[in-house]
Structure formats: structure tokens, C-alpha cells
Amino acid sequence: MTSKSKLLISLAGAGALIGTMLVAQPVAEGGRKFVKELTGQAELDGGRLTADMDGRGIAHVTVNVGQGRVCWDLQDLANLDTLVASHIHQAPANAQGPIKISFFNFGEPIDLEGCTEVPGTTAFPFDRARLIDLSEHPENYYVNVHTTAFPGGAIRGQLSRGKQG
């Protein structure tokens, strides 16, 4: 084999490797993504607004059924008292519901960005069936953030299909 042939084979191999790296995404990047604005106006308690009315933030949530994982990134949190918990609850927009997936809970370290995997936590276990339901019916779930001043929930955002906001 000539030097020119070896060079061409090397360049072709390097090009294929670079192309694969550009196309392939890290496994953690998969899943269904939701971006939702969190507000005090969206937090309900028996039909009454009992929340931090000037509090706000954005929740980035990724549900990856294949990995059995939910990841979150709470950003731009503003006008809130000390954070104490954040979760995904199951309920429609006009109701309160039980915690289904915990980001961080009362008495635990505050983790504004992270992931939790099946089977979840001892207090809030979940399975792949829950992740499938969350992916297929996001309108039945909401993210909220609890604070010292509003332990029942300070800000909230209902998940939904389509355009997020």
C-alpha cells in the first residue's frame, strides 16, 4: 500500500469518527423535554390563591422512560423565600395532587439541578409506568416549589404537550 493510500484511508476513518461524534448525542440527552414557567398565580389551594404572588421561575424537566430517569433544572427563581422542597405532583390545573416524583424534599439538601431514577426515593417511589404516563399525559402533572413562607407551594407550573412556556 502506498503512502498516499494509507493517508486517504486514515483521513476517511477520521472523517467517519468525527461524523459519528457530531451525530451521536450523550444518552442523558434523550427523553421528553418540558420547559414550564412557574408562578404564584398557578398555585392553588382549594380554589384560593395562597402562594407567593410575585415569585417566579422556570422548570426544565426531561422524562426519559428508556433510562428510567427524570431530570430537572430549576432556573431564574426570583422573589422567593428560602426553598424547602420541589416536586412533580399529579393533578389537573385546577386541583392539588399528591407528590409523585421528588426533586428535593423537606429536610433534604436543596438541589436545583439533578436527576432521579427508578425506583425514586423511599418516600416517593415511581416506576417506568409512571414515567410513561407523565410523558403521554403531562397535563395531569405539575411542578411546584415550596418555601418557608409557603410550605404548601409557592410557585407552580402545569406541564403540557406542545409549546412549553
Image (tube, helix red, strand yellow):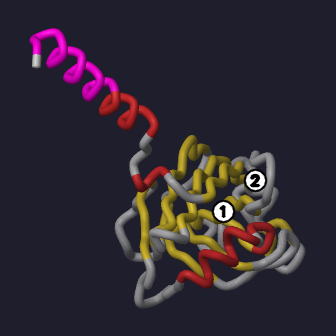
Label 2 and label 1: CA atoms lie apart by: 8 Å
What residue sits 41% from the left and 55% below the top?
A: 27
- Relative placement, left or right, of 159 versus 73 is right
Which of the pair 1/112 is nearer the observer? 1
Which of the pair 18/49 is nearer the observer? 18
Judged from the image, the secondary structure of the residue bearing numbered disc 2 is: loop
Q: Amino acid at mark 1?
A: Ala
Callout 2 environment at 10 Å: few (<14), some (14 to 19), or many (20+)? some
Q: Main secondary structure of the magenta part?
A: helix
**Spot occupied by residue 8 in the image (x, y as percentages of width and height):** 24, 16
- Relative placement, left or right, of 64 versus 134 is left
Residue farthest along the front direction in this orientation: 1
What residue sits 85% from the left and 80% below the top?
A: 46
Callout 1 environment at 10 Å: few (<14), some (14 to 19), or many (20+)? many
Judged from the image, the secondary structure of the residue bearing numbered disc 1 is: loop
Q: Are marks 2 and 1 in contact (CB under 8 Å)?
A: no
Quadrant of the image for the N terminus? top left
Q: Amino acid at mark 2?
A: Met
N-terminal of the pair, mark 2 or mark 1, is: 2
The mark found on residue 53 in the picture is 2
Q: Which residues are magenta?
A: 2-15
Q: How many marks?
A: 2
Queried whether the magenta region covers residue 120, the answer comes back as: no
What residue sits 30% from the left and 33% below the top?
A: 17
- Relative placement, left or right, of 21 versus 78 is left
| Residue placed under numbered mark 1 in the picture | 154
Queried whether the magenta region covers residue 7, the answer comes back as: yes
